[in-house]
Image: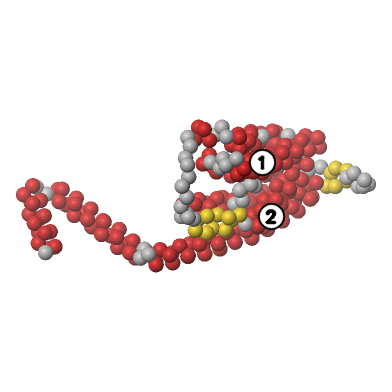
């Protein structure tokens, strides 16, 4: 949604961020909108009905409204300078909850094949894990076009699937089958999901390789880190042995260490 999963990692420069108490951040307008979006999930799910076009349409409209509020809270956060730690956690969480929970309910209503939802969920989990690693390594994530296209197709496809029934089109003599259109859009979103995921892995690998090159230029290599860790382990073992010795033996051991240093 507003914060795309599919983004290209690059190296981050350290920035000074003014921290605020989390209790204050949760009451910011963008975060309250995000919480309201999470609160709409039960309404979306309860109105999914295979026998009532009216209830299905209501479910679709609530979902569309929730998707619109996602863009709104992102815009307000940037506009008001309220990009917060809580917001960075809640926004993607709300996106995943609303999309995945709706897809699961659509499977139970036999509107979507289970294998399709499993692939979409597996992709989301994999990219979420990679993003966590990228963040820990200090990569800056800039939005990619593939992720935005995937998100737009996925959201539109879910809205059509929630409508489900054929509805008459104004000024035309026939009705549009919203279910068939939604399935086609979801298949297209799956293709874009896989394509953008491959791109994300590729960009991540390039960024990791660049990081390794820069660290090697600074003298930080895997072999050097292993040797340093080995030296620390040896020092700890010597310290444990010395602590087990009697006071007289401990003094003798220290004198031997001094002689070896000379």
- 33 displayed left or right of 253: right
User: According to the image, label 1 marks what residue?
Assistant: 72
State the CA–CA distance, disc 2 to disc 1.
Answer: 19 Å
- The answer to whether residue 237 shows anywhere in this view is yes
Q: How would you rate the neighbour count of disc 2 (Cα within 10 Å): few for under 14, some for 14-19, many for 20 or more?
A: some
Position above or below: 175 against 192: above
Q: Residue at the location (53% across, 41% down)?
A: 84
Residue 5 % position (x, y): 59, 52
Residue pointed to by mark 2: 149
Q: Nearer the viewer, residue 261 or 156?
A: 261
Q: Which mark is residue 220?
A: none
Q: Name the element at disc 2.
A: helix
Which callout, 2 or 1, points at the residue further toward the start of the chain?
1
Q: Nearer the viewer, mark 2 or mark 1?
A: 1
Q: Residue at x 46, y 52 (%)?
A: 14
In what element is the residue under mark 1? helix
Residue 220, horizontal then vertical, whole percent: 36, 63
Q: How many residues crowd around disc 1 within 10 Å: few (fewer than 14), some, or many (20 or more)?
A: some
Quadrant of residue 60 within the rendered picture: top right
Query: Where residue 23 sits in the image (x, y, percent)?
Result: 50, 32
Q: Where, by quadrant of the figure, is residue 162 drawn?
A: top right
**Residue 211, percent from left and from top:** 45, 62
Decide if residue 66 is on the left or right side of residue 229: right
Which one is in front, 175 or 133? 133
Residue 8 vs residue 153, the one in the foreground = 8
Q: Is residue 155 above or below residue 210?
A: above
Is residue 194 in view from this perspective?
no
At 22% from the left edge and 56% from the top edge, which residue is drawn?
235
Seen at 52% across and 33% down, the residue is 24
- Quarter of the image with the C terminus in it: bottom left
Q: Are marks 2 and 1 in contact (CB under 8 Å)?
A: no
Residue 37, relative to residue 219: is it above or below?
A: above
């Amino acid at each position: 949604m507003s914060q795309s999963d599919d983004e290209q990692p690059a190296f981050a420069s350290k920035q000074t961020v003014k921290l605020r108490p989390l209790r204050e951040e949760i009451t910011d307008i963008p975060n309250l909108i995000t919480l309201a979006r999470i609160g709409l999930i039960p309404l979306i799910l309860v109105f999914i009905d295979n026998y009532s076009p009216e209830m299905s349409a209501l479910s679709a409209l609530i979902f569309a409204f929730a998707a619109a509020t996602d863009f709104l809270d992102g815009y307000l956060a940037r506009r008001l300078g309220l990009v917060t730690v809580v917001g960075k956690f809640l926004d993607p969480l709300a996106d995943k909850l609303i999309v995945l929970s709706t897809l699961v309910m659509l499977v139970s209503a036999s509107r979507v094949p289970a294998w399709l939802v499993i692939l979409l969920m597996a992709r989301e989990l994999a990219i979420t894990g990679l993003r966590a690693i990228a963040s820990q390594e200090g990569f800056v994530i800039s939005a990619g076009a593939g992720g935005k296209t995937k998100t737009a197709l996925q959201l539109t496809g879910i809205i059509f699937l929630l409508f489900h029934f054929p509805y008459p089109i104004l000024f035309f003599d026939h009705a549009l089958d919203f279910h068939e259109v939604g399935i086609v859009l979801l298949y297209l979103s799956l293709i874009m999901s896989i394509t953008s995921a491959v791109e994300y892995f590729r960009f991540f690998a390039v960024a990791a390789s660049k990081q390794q090159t820069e660290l090697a230029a600074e003298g930080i290599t895997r072999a050097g880190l292993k040797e340093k860790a080995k030296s620390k382990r040896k020092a700890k073992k010597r310290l444990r042995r010395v602590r087990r010795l009697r006071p007289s033996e401990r003094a003798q051991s220290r004198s031997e260490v001094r002689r070896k240093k000379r």
